[in-house]
Every structure is written in C-alpha cells, then in structure tokens.
Image (tube, rainbow, N blue to C red):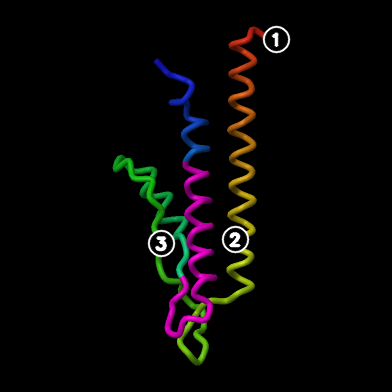
C-alpha cells in the first residue's frame, strides 16, 4: 500500500529539500572561512550525489568536495565571495520551490480528506 508520506513525489521533494539544505550549509561554511588562509572552498557534487541516491544504497547524503579550477588567492584561500553568495541564493530558491510544492501536495491531501470542503 502506498501511503501519503511514501509517495514518490513526497520522497523526491524531501530529497530536494535535503540537497538544498546541504548546499546552504556548504556555502555558509565557505563564507565563514572567507578570510581563513589556505582554506579550500567546498561544493556539493550534484552528479555524484544524484548517482548515489539513485543506486540501491539508499544514501541521500550529499557528496561534498573541494571546488576544482578555482584560482587561489595569495594566502591559498579559494573562496570567492560573489560565487558563494550566488550559491546561497540558488540553494535558498530551490528550498523555497520544493517547500511550496510539498505544501501544495499536502493541501491537496487535506482537501481530499475533508471531501472537498
């Protein structure tokens, strides 16, 4: 039996929320270390995370790695303020979109339970 909370849509939206939160956390960590000498900026690896979540492993944990191809400053730090602010904004937008879709899904369920009232 397929329950409401087990539906594919709810599960997919839940994974999207988790990925958005992980991206926000990584961007916040990078921003917190913008002045730390030698700090290597991190990013959530989308393709690898997607592959891992599609496999039977059941792991939805995001894969985080150092950013590639980002030039380091003299102090060895690779955090780029504008890039991190953009990443934070995009993750926030993705979270809001998934949250809105999930809320709409549950409004439809509530509507059905209340028989259209």
Number of on-image labels: 3
Establish if 68 lies above or below 114.
Answer: below
Farthest residue in the left direction?
57
Whether residues under marks 2 and 1 lie with C-beta atoms below 8 angstroms apart, the answer is no
Q: Is residue 30 magenta?
A: yes
The residue under label 1 is 117
User: First in sequence: mark 2 or mark 3?
Assistant: 3
The residue under label 2 is 88
Establish if 65 lies above or below 109.
Answer: below
Farthest residue in the bottom direction?
74
User: First in sequence: mark 2 or mark 1?
Assistant: 2
Closer-to-camera residue (35/39): 35
Q: CA distance from mark 2 to mark 1?
A: 39 Å
The residue under label 3 is 64
Mark 3 lies on a secondary structure that is strand
Q: Position of residue 13 (x, y in %)?
A: 52, 37
Q: Residues within 10 Å of mark 2 (few under 14, many from 20)?
A: many
Q: CA distance from mark 3 to mark 1?
A: 46 Å
Whether residues under marks 2 and 3 lie with C-beta atoms below 8 angstroms apart, the answer is no
Q: Position of residue 112 (x, y in %)?
A: 61, 12
Farthest residue in the right direction?
117
Q: Which mark, residue 54?
A: none
């Amino acid at each position: 039996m397929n329950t409401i909370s087990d539906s594919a849509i709810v599960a997919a939206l839940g994974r999207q929320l988790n990925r958005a939160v992980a991206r926000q956390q990584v961007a916040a960590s990078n921003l917190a270390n913008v002045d730390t000498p030698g700090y290597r900026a991190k990013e959530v690896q989308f393709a690898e995370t997607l592959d891992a979540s599609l496999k039977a492993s059941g792991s939805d944990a995001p894969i985080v790695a150092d950013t590639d191809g980002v030039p380091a400053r003299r102090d060895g730090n690779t955090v780029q303020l504008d890039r991190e602010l953009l990443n934070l904004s995009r993750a926030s937008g993705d979270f809001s979109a998934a949250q809105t879709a999930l809320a709409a899904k549950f409004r439809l369920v509530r509507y059905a339970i209340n028989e259209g009232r």
